[in-house]
Image: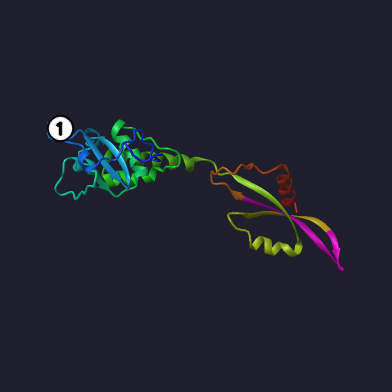
Amino acid sequence: MAEKSPDPSGSSARRCPALSPGERLQPSASGSSKWVRLNVGGTYFLTTRQTLCRDPKSFLYRLCQADPDLDSDKDETGAYLIDRDPTYFGPVLNYLRHGKLVLNRGLAEEGVLEEAEFYNITSLIKLVKDKIRERDCKTAQLPVKHVYRVLQCQEEELTQMVSTMSDGWKFEQLVSIGSSYNYGNEDQAEFLCVVSKELHNQSYGTNSEPSEKAKILQEQGSRM
């Protein structure tokens, strides 16, 4: 249960007010309180011991058992202090609650994996690694797409234009379109230069197939 609002980690629990030292959660008759309060990177979470003890090999299980080898401090409200990113603790806590990995938009699997490894939650580590492997496999299988551009330039500009191409653009075809004007006693030839770039599965909003004009210029250039 997180206290900050809005909670970027996606935790759906209610917000709980800070407790004064006199209002700290009191142990039940059985010897320990059902609820546990955590201060993760400045954000408060309220959950049950049962949830935190899902994985008996995890850091959170040892925290609930008051492991003497675990150096854990508490803040003035009695919450356990954990110096980790609260944004990614939300998905970890929700996984312990219902056994499913749910990520809000903008959160990366690698971030959850980092936290799962820190808390030593073995089942979550395996699940996240499988999802990363599946994601990368799908990305690798997607066909490489290209975007084409046709640039018009004069003869004296050709060398500079080709040598300064960057950001993944590469030269494809050069088509002469004759002389455009006379400069002094010399005719200045003009060219159409076809360049291309791989999209690498990104969405640019540009047609990834070569335009009809680019195709015609490529055919003309191949016959020259």
Name the image colouring: rainbow
> Which quadrant of the structure image shows residue 135?
top left
Q: Quadrant of the N terminus?
A: top left
Q: Position of residue 179 (x, y in %)?
A: 83, 59
Residue placed furthest toward the left: 30
Residue annotated with mark 1: 28
Query: Which is the main secondary structure of the residues drawn in magenta?
Result: strand
Horizontal side, residue 87 vs residue 118: left or right: right
Question: Please, is residue 101 above or below residue 183 in the view?
Answer: above
Q: Position of residue 84 (x, y in %)?
A: 31, 48
Q: Which residues are magenta?
A: 180-196
Q: Is 182 inside the magenta-drawn segment? A: yes
**Residue shown at the point (45%, 42%) measured from the top left:** 106
> Which quadrant of the structure image shows residue 176?
bottom right
Q: Position of residue 119 (x, y in %)?
A: 27, 44
Q: At numbered mark 1, what does the secondary structure look like: helix, strand or loop?
A: loop
> Which quadrant of the structure image shows residue 136?
top left
Q: In this figure, what is the number of numbered marks?
A: 1
Q: Quadrant of the C terminus?
A: bottom right
Residue type at the position of mark 1: Ser
Decide which of 19, 45 is in the foreground and name it.
19
